[in-house]
Image: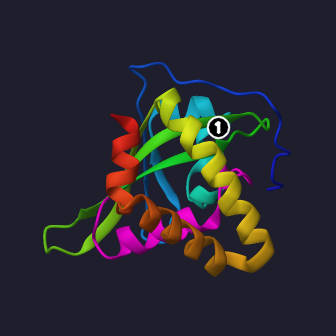
């Protein structure tokens, strides 16, 4: 399946919209609610068993996804602002919470993500931050982008969670 070409068309979630999806432990989509399917522009059968990265917008720094995967693979939840790419090239921003679902023996079974509308004021901070991270990534790779994120957080005197959750309040 070819990647869509991003356009300037933005889709906006309403205050009470919730996007829900689940992936297997390798990041392949195994469930998506109607809102997830509708906003993506894909048919359900086009999404199932595909990597969740099918929705990854090129404006998203890899450092954010690296952090996300490190967290969930270690059993921790994470919150993140994510710009997703629709099948027709449109995009939408979400405030995502990703958690691990465990089976009855305590083993990781899948990853569960609930996404909602981000605060506009949060995006005023996130958009330039992500642009800086992406520019650094293009200059020096993933490690450079990750170092820049850590430097920015250190200069602010906060950890990632405190920074991200503070933006949504």
Q: Is residue 67 magenta?
A: yes
166 over 121 or under it: above or below: below
* Viewer-closest of 30 and 129: 129
Look at the image and tell me in which quarter the C terminus lies. Answer: top left
* Viewer-closest of 144 and 114: 144
* Viewer-closest of 94 and 34: 94
Check disc 1 and report the residue beneath it. 43
Residue 151 position in % (x across, y down): 51, 70
- Residue 120 appears in the rendering: yes
Image point 83% across, 55% down: which residue? Answer: 2
Residue 13 position in % (x across, y down): 52, 24
Image point 38% across, 20% down: which residue? Answer: 16
Residue 45 position in % (x across, y down): 61, 45
Look at the image and tell me in which quarter the N terminus lies. Answer: bottom right
Direction from residue 25 to residue 65 in the image, left or right: right
Q: Is residue 147 magenta?
A: no
- Residue 50 appears in the rendering: no
93 over 148 or under it: above or below: above
106 over 7 or under it: above or below: below
Image point 46% across, 29% down: which residue? Answer: 119
93 over 71 or under it: above or below: above
* Viewer-closest of 72 and 62: 62
Q: SS of the residue at dot 1?
A: loop
Give residue 41's quadrant in the image: top right
Give residue 88's quadrant in the image: top right
Direction from residue 163 to residue 121 in the image, left or right: right
Residue 120 position in % (x across, y down): 52, 28
- Residues shaded magenta: 54-77
Direction from residue 141 to residue 92 in the image, left or right: left
């Amino acid at each position: 399946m070819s990647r869509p070409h991003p356009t300037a068309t933005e889709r906006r979630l309403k205050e009470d919209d919730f996007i829900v999806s689940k992936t297997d432990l390798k990041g392949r989509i195994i469930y998506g609610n109607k809102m997830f399917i509708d906003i993506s522009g894909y048919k359900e059968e086009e999404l199932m068993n595909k990597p969740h990265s099918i929705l990854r917008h090129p404006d998203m720094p890899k450092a954010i996804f690296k952090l996300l995967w490190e967290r969930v693979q270690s059993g921790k939840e994470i919150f993140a602002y994510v710009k997703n790419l629709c099948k027709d090239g449109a995009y939408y921003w979400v405030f995502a919470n990703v958690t691990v679902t465990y089976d009855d023996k305590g083993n990781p079974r899948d990853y569960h993500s609930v996404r909602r509308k981000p605060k506009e004021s949060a995006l005023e901070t996130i958009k330039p931050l992500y642009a800086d991270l992406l520019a650094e990534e293009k200059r020096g790779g993933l490690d450079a982008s990750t170092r820049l994120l850590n430097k920015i957080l250190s200069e602010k005197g906060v950890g990632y969670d405190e920074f991200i959750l503070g933006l949504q309040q």
